[in-house]
Amino acid sequence: MKKLILISTLGVWLSCAAAAHGAVVNYDLTISEKIIAPEGKRVIALAINDSIPGPTLRFRVGDTARIRVHNRLPKEATILHWHGLLLPNAQDGVAPLTTPAIPAGKYFDYEFPLTHAGTFWYHSHKGLQEQRGLYGAIVVEPTEAVGPPVDREHVVVLSDWTNEDPNEVMRTLLRGDEWYAIRKGNMQSIWGAHKAGALGEYFSREWTRMPPMDISDVAYDAFWANGKKRMPLDSKGGERVKLRLINAGASTYFYVHSATGPLTIVAADGQNVEPVKVNRLLMGMGETYDVIVTLPASGRYEVRATAQDGSGHASIFLGAGAEHLAKNIPKPDLYSMDWMLAGLEKDDEPLDTPEPPRPLSPYRKLRALASTKLPVDAPVREIELRLTGNMQRYMWSFNGKMIKEESTIRVKRGEVLRMKFINDTMMHHPLHLHGHFFRLLNGQGDFAPLKHTVDVPPMARAAIEFLANEQGDWIFHCHLLYHMKAGMSRVISYDDQGADHKPKLDYQSMNPWTFNMDATAQTNFSEGRAGWRNARNNLDFTWDYEFEEKEYEMDVVLKYFHNHNWSSLYGYRFTNEHDAKDRAFAGAQYRLPLMAYNRLTVDSEGDFRTGLAKSLQLTQRLSLENELEYDTHSDWEWRAGLEYRLNKRWSITGGYHSDHAFGLGLNFKW
């Protein structure tokens, strides 16, 4: 252990010595609002120095960065995080954990040494500002050239854009609305399963109570490369061009592929690796890759970044002359995971195994240029994190607990922390660790590559390890922005801060209450619910009103969600129905196989009520809503109706209700 401390101290001394001989590089960055009009609609974005993405910051190893960040936003605070850079804890840019947020009209001075080369980036770590345009590239050049020679290089920042306010996107996700899947044409349905020859798989999934596979949460209006859908880059025929690729998307994995043929990966997350060729490169949010493209003697060739869900792409073009487009990537099969499981790399699989049409991240092929072995005398501690989530309530967590419920993973300086991830969800999760590089345990032994972000595919596993050689608190989180906001984070907290130390976290912004509504007005009656919810709680007002008889039943209900299947509820009912009285009630709701919901309540008058509800998604936009209910006071009641989704807010609905006969009307969602 003394040897470990000596090595760490020597490393700090060498870094300081390097900084002392490097240049001081100054940047002024101004964050402000900017009116843009992507897809013809004027919206308010956020920009850095009036640009999206912000300017590329360039340094050399040994330089000292001095960056003044001005906040010119009218009302909101902001902050910038320097993604992938090893720097002092207080400079990391996560408010309030490590660095104070910058109030509107103020500025903050960052200063830190550049100790390692590579492709990195910076972005806001405040709320959902990253989605609105606050990101840019960082390039740190080595003191000596490393890797294959190239003729020129370009930085390519990939991102996704929505014309909606990201806070409205988050509210939509939190209410469990399927509109984004419908808008993209990715909504699973019985008719879609029939056309795909997968009805058996569809109902088998429903029987096991597994929600539909959701490749991407949000329907985006555009995908960008350096802020544009199509971007020409200076280059000539026959050149070897290095592209510094950065996935700055908020919730989009990109497949990067080229009309020139395979890409040669030479660095991952800023760390050089042995060159390896891939036909299609899957990049998770937060990851960076340096790739080399060799241009033919003539022609203009597309390098395309395709959204993993197939909903769009961004393009850059290299060379000059006749245009050559990259081939389309096959659309995902929504009803089978076979294509995804085929992409999972197996430990005994040869490295030259042909790539599937939709490959996963190329981790097994990545090999460091030098040994990354950690000190053999350092104690090793293993922890297991299960990646857990609930799309219906948009809860994302580790081991079933959001950061507000369990915030901290404590580490001891000098130990090796080995983290094993098990993904229990149907989505990819790019997990990012601040302040450290970790070894990706990919079967390469002592030459395991160093990374700061790792993709964990659906129903898959991954493992990393790192030496705890820092101090303070460092955030570890899913880099899918909305998952992080929903609770999929932890703080890596060094225990030398004391047994009573608690990380500085903004608990008030976590797990917020949001208002939502689902209301129907038909020719014969009206029913619906409106209220507030967070991840585990609903406070709802529900109603059922019959127009002709002017009878009503209105409930105020508090519901608590224990897990995917069980919830308990407590409420009070107001009614003017014949022979009925106002009453309190309590009960539970259980999710049955085939995604049906059973509800049982007992009230203060001694009556009980049980019900069964099931929605059948017939087509992308058309669903059949069914409900059966028995009450010991009012006997049987049932309804069946069709709902056709017009847009995010409105649906046409109609059907038969045993108490209200036939009706036709509209449904409104908020």
Image (cartoon, rainbow, N blue to C red):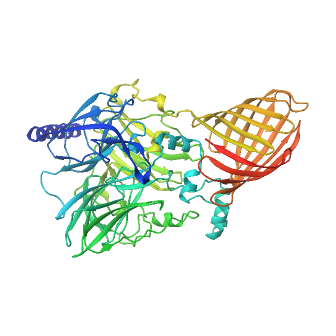
The residue positioned farthest toward the right in the image shown:
579
Q: Is residue 144 visible?
A: yes
Depth order, front residue of 608/509: 509
Instruction: Classify 277 as above or below 118.
Output: below
Residue 32, picture quadrant: top left
- Circle count: 0
Drawn side of residue 652 relative to residue 245, left or right: right
The quarter of the rendered structure image containing the C terminus is: top right
Residue sitting at 44 percent across and 70 percent down? 357
Q: Position of residue 299 (x, y in %)?
A: 26, 74
Q: Is residue 313 left or right of residue 659?
A: left
The residue lying furthest to the left in this view is 21
Measured as percent of width and height from the top left, residue 403 is found at: 47, 36
Task: Give the image location of residue 30, x and y in percent.
Answer: 27, 37
Frontmost residue, 156 versus 224: 224
The one of 219 and 13 positioned closer to us in this rendering? 219
Judged from this view, the residue extending furthest toward the top is 500
Residue 55 drawn at (x, y percent):
25, 46
Q: Is residue 310 left or right of residue 493?
A: right
Q: Nearer the viewer, residue 298 or 398?
A: 298
Q: Is residue 242 above or below residue 67?
A: below
Report whether residue 398 is seen: no
Q: In which quadrant of the rendered view does residue 524 lie?
A: top right
Which quadrant would the N terminus be assigned to in this image? top left
> Residue 201 falls in which quadrant of the image?
bottom right
Horizontal arrangement in the rendering, residue 586 relative to residue 235 (left or right): right
- Residue at (61% x, 59% y) in the render: 188
